[in-house]
Amino acid sequence: MKKDNKKEEKQPKKSDFKVFLKKRAPIYLGIIALLVVFVIPELTKGDLRSSFPNNLTDDQKQIVETIMSYNGPNKKGLTVIDAISEQIATDYPNEKIYKDKKTKVNLDVSSIENMYEVILTFESYKGVKEYAWDFNPVTQEIKPKNPNAKHIIDLVNYYD
């Protein structure tokens, strides 16, 4: 009897937690791998708005937000930023263009008397697209200055 007791004392008890992990570790690793491969890229997906530079003043940010959220005379439907994003998505199907090293988004806001000039430049490996608008903060009027900007404003104005 005494020998049996000594053998039991000498054998270390296995930790329940270690046994639990050894049995289920491959399952947990598989779940973590699936999250890393499928969920995290979707959460960190780039878009046009997140590509805007952060060096704008508060007034400039407000002007840009007003122009980008403009959704036509009826105040419903497609916004300017949605129209530009759709145009970029059409030009670059099945590509994560905002993650590309050659893609640059520049936003320039300058004040000219009582008007603001906003220029959005989208540069990628296919070339440069520039959108330029004049904005009157008093009347909230947006005037396109180039054909790309006019096309976007027309899309927004006549979108059902």
Image (cartoon, rainbow, N blue to C red):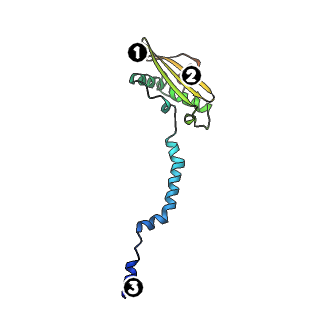
The residue identified by callout 1 is 138
In the image, which is nearer the foreground, mark 1 or mark 2? 2
The residue lying at 47 percent from left, 28 percent from top is 53
| Vertical order, 116 against 86 (above or below) | above
Find residue 48 and report its horizontal and vertical position in percent.
51, 31
Query: Where residue 130 is drawn, which disc sits there?
Result: 2
- The 10 Å Cα crowd at callout 2, few under 14, some 14 to 19, many 20 or more, is some
The residue identified by callout 3 is 4
Find residue 49 and report its horizontal and vertical position in percent.
49, 31
Query: Where residue 93 is drawn, which disc sits there?
Result: none
The residue lying at 48 percent from left, 21 percent from top is 108
Compare residues 32 and 72 and report the one nearer the observer.
Answer: 32
Residue furthest to the top: 113
Find residue 24 and report its horizontal and vertical position in percent.
48, 63
Tell me the quadrant of the picture where the N terminus can be found. Answer: bottom left
Q: Given the image, on which type of amino acid does mark 1 rest?
A: Val
Q: Quadrant of residue 138?
A: top left
- The 10 Å Cα crowd at callout 1, few under 14, some 14 to 19, many 20 or more, is few
Q: Left or right: where does residue 58 sit relative to residue 79? A: left
In the image, which is nearer the foreground, mark 2 or mark 3? 3
Q: Earlier in the sequence, mark 3 or mark 1?
A: 3
Q: Quadrant of residue 102?
A: top right
Q: CA distance from mark 1 to mark 2?
A: 25 Å
